[in-house]
Image: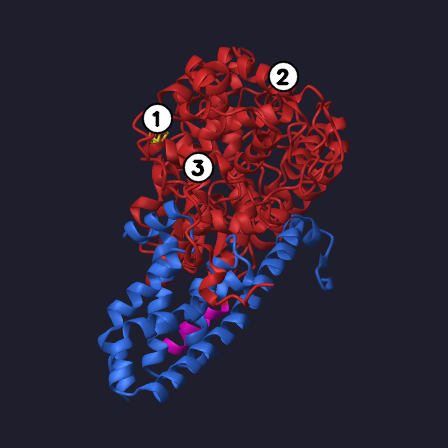
Chain colours: A red, B blue
Amino acid sequence: MAKTPTPAELLPGLSYKPPEKGWMDVKPDFRPGTYCNPAAPKWMEWINYPYPAARSIPEDNWELPKDWKEIVLQGMEDRLQRFRSLKVFFDICVRCGACADKCHFFLGTGDPKNMPVLRAELLRSVYRRYFKTIGRVLGEIAGARDLTEDVIKEWFFYLYQCTICRRCSLFCPYGIDMAEMTLLGRELLASVGLNIDWAMASVAQCYDKGSHIGAPPQAFKDMVDFLAEENERITGINTMPSINRKGAEVLFVMPSGDYFADPGTFTMMGYMLLFEHIGLDYTLSTYAAEGGNFGWFISHEMGKRLNAKIYAEAKRLGVKWILGGECGHMWRVCNQYMSTWWGPVDFLEKPVSPITGTKFENASVHKMVHISEFTADLIHHNKLNLDPQRNAHIKLTFHDSCNTARGMGILEEPRYIINNVLPEGNFVEMPPNTIREKAFCCGSSSGINANENMELRMQGGFPRANAVRFVHEKYGVNHLGCICALDRATLPTLLEYWVPQVEITGISELVGNALIFPDELERTTDLRDRDLVGFGELAEEAGEEEE
Amino acid sequence: MQIATLLSQKKAAILGRWLSMIYESYPPETAIFLRKEKNRFDNPAGYRISEGLEGLYGTLLQEMERDQVMACLDEIIRIRALQNFTPSQALAFIFLLKIVIRQELAEEIQKENLAAEILDLESRIDGLALLGFDVYTKRREKIYEIKANEAKRRVSGLMRKTGLTEDGLL
Ligand code: SF4
Ligand code: SF4
């Protein structure tokens, strides 16, 4: 029997000084809410992924294949040969600690193993043990350790507490890319059957049915029809797009979140209004109906398998080039991997805006343009008739999505659009150490936005929400803008916990609100049916009062 | 009256020590960081926890609306309700203030015979802790609520299309 503890005795750091344990000896605490469930076997079977089994994290036995160790070490060796970067990242870190406090998961959880330098050490220690003479000889003294099942479990825990956001790399004097290491580590886990259910289910459904959510082509068409009807109801403008039309100039590919889930749906309505406004010759595809790519969160190979649909469809439909919607990781995959995977892309032309004649030189290899680049160019050439007053009810701040901002350098385009579709003074930036290249991640990206992982996500997104709260309290910001579908799916939840007064919006939604059509209905609401400020009855009443 | 004056005078020392004890409930590397980094955006947890503590301390110095007290508690508890703590560990920080006050005011308590006042003060700290339970429970409920809401939002466009809302037909 023990005495009832005092409050101080309940807290480990206060009651006793825990013995100085090396990080290798501290085991992860798989607390519900902080990890994703392992993938159900059926999803893995659907896409022929190895070693499907019904696994449970709290169980000791993770049903690893008999020769799991050989598989992992062989996989590591293969990757060290294939990716020179990996070897460099393993060897070059001087443990200066510049990255240590830059990860949102460290800031939110307070768990030192979420310091990027330690996250990398999880893999690096095994590399040292098996691939470096010094580690082979000296073992732990040289920071090396045996590959055991516990190490695998630790990888599973911490590699899925990294959103591949690359914020840490920005602060590393050597540019060591933790994201790359996390991805390769996840591949090694997948090679012995360890995947997360949320990502795997999305991948399997996308592979089999066409979108992460598993809706068939008919449902996609139904939703597009519905959103076009909504546009017509609100603006009086017919924005119904063609689907699977051969010979269109442009194939438009968007993430499925944009046509299934609010508030993405309003962004989708915005795209459709924009294209109607400029008379773009475009089509959608039921085969390439998913721009997002959860496959990339699992392995490069799976990323490639899902991505195949986009070029295949562009080729079949005979379009000239591809335009992509507001999505972060989709954009990173398309921009950074697509032409390496499939190139040269000689069946498409260098993208040229049919409205302004601008040649998108940056897209000349992979032939795909981001909607923010496209829209900013239209505004720059004065091709859009905009009334920013229609967004007067929106006081906005902008979240730079890691993949578009830090990954691809799309920093100015969304801001340029925002400044043109909002009344002056309605756009406020968050503090500089939380935006642009230094943006804090949403905390839910890279396939970990599972419901069962909520506590972890709320911790990871805390630094982002903390900055949002600041501009909300100081400037009355009521909307957080973004150009990423995962953000639109997960930031509403994050803010519901931390700053419930602020809503999420895509940038194309704001464009859609502001567009003026010659033969439109009198606009009294925005695309979400919310009253506009200073329009319709309210404006008339105000006018009468003045008289 | 006397104790209130002492609390104001020794505010910096008491708050500093209290904060320090909370930081020590984190792993050593984390505690160092929480203490060291002063930028409120680079160290959100450190900033919000210290703000919350200051607010709570204020509730002992002057009367405040219940909502304000709850808000100060929430500032800290909503962080700790997510982190790797049991409920008792998440809330233990409130009681720590008693230890800090007894340590910081040890001399005065003896010399000036403040036993009765201290008892009253400690009782109010217990009150804070009890309110802390309410806040903690609300935060845990909130997690379930946001999970449910997110699940609905995933197909919310589809639901609007079919004319369905969570409560039935539109
Ligand atoms: S890539 Fe992002 S999530 Fe991963 S360790 Fe670096 S900062 Fe953290
Ligand atoms: S900043 Fe770079 S070199 Fe320094 S510890 Fe981090 S990964 Fe290693």
Judged by depth in the image, the label closer to the viewer, 3 or 1, is 3
Q: Secondary structure at mark 1?
A: loop
**Label 1 beta carbon within 8 A of ligand 2:** yes
Residue B29 colored magenta? no
Q: Secondary structure at mark 3?
A: loop
Which residue is identified by label 2?
A70
Q: Is residue A252 above or below residue A269?
A: above
Q: Which residues are magenta?
A: A537-547
Is any atom of residue A318 visible in this view? yes
Structural distance between the alpha carbons of marks 2 and 1? 31 Å
Q: Is residue B116 above or below residue B51?
A: below
Which residue lies most toward the front here?
A1
Residue A280: image x %, image y %? 53, 32
Residue A545 colored magenta? yes
Q: Residues within 10 Å of mark 3 (few under 14, many from 20)?
A: few
**Residue contact between numbered discs 2 and 1, judged by CB atoms under 8 Å:** no
Which residue lies most toward the left here?
B9
A5 to the left or right of A295: left
Is any atom of residue A516 visible in this view? no
Residue in front for this viewpoint, A456 or A150: A150
**Label 2 beta carbon within 8 A of ligand 1:** no
* Image quadrant where residue A95 sits: top left
Which residue is identified by label 3?
A22
Q: For the residue marked with disc 2, what is the amino acid?
A: Glu
- Say which chain tag 3 marks: A
- Residue drawn at point x = 46 percent, y = 45 percent: A111
Residue B14: image x %, image y %? 29, 69
Residue A545: image x %, image y %? 40, 78
Q: Residues within 10 Å of mark 1 (few under 14, many from 20)?
A: some
Residue in front for this viewpoint, B116 or A131: B116
Q: For the residue marked with disc 1, what is the amino acid?
A: Gly
